[in-house]
Amino acid sequence: MKNLLRLLALASFVLAPALVRADPLPSSAVDAKPLAVGAHAPAVTLTDMEGDQVDLAKVFAEKPTVLVFYRGSWCPFCSQQLAALGELEPKLLALGYQIIAISPDTAEGLKKTAGKNHLDYRLLSDHGMVASSAYGTAFRLSPEIEKKYGGYNVPLTPIPGGEGYWLPVPTVYLIGRDSLIKFVYSNPDYKVRLSSDALLTAAEAAAK
């Protein structure tokens, strides 16, 4: 019962379901609508740090997946989350999961993140906003935020075929081999991330 209540509390951070990207692109993290529990995880193709194509549909079919959307190698909150996920990896592997983390980074950015945080799990590039759009996590940066980040020399990613720049809302999904989403945590406040304890609790529950 305690674990159930905890998961219900986490669910308060999950935004309304969206099967396709809203048009126009959401103008803030608050307006983004990540896919909800029960939706089918979109089958998209991304690239890894070696530049090889990765078909997520095939990856999901192999084993249950912890899928993480993060902002990039430049984000300290993302680095902390990814490092903590690396420490949790042995327990997740024991439950039968694999870990996939997706960001707008180029291949070089992925290599930087993997090296800096000593990560063994797979990092994928969504530089073209394909996955973030399909999963409803992408949003357009406001001119104010764009200017602020530019002042910090943050390597922002241009919106494909449009003006401005975009980021994903940090989001964690648990996805079954049938590609059904079993758990979602998404918070528009990028400073607040799902704790390792909460993720493990959710993973244990979803694995039953």
Image (tube, helix red, strand yellow):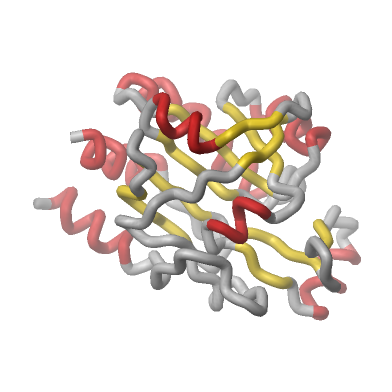
State the quadrant of the C terminus: top left
Vertical relation: 135 (above or below) 118 = below
Vertical relation: 12 (above or below) 174 = below
Left/right of residue 117 with respect to residue 15 in the rendered view: right
Q: Nearer the viewer, residue 12 or 37?
A: 37
Q: Residue at x 52, y 29 (%)?
A: 86
- Residue 116 visible in image: no
Left/right of residue 2 with respect to residue 126 in the rendered view: left
Q: Position of residue 73 (x, y in %)?
A: 73, 43
Q: Residue at x 73, y 35 (%)?
A: 110
Q: Residue at x 63, y 40 (%)?
A: 45
Q: Residue at x 79, y 34 (%)?
A: 107
Vertical relation: 100 (above or below) 136 = above
Q: Position of residue 184 (x, y in %)?
A: 38, 54
Q: Position of residue 162 (x, y in %)?
A: 83, 70
Outermost residue, left side: 1
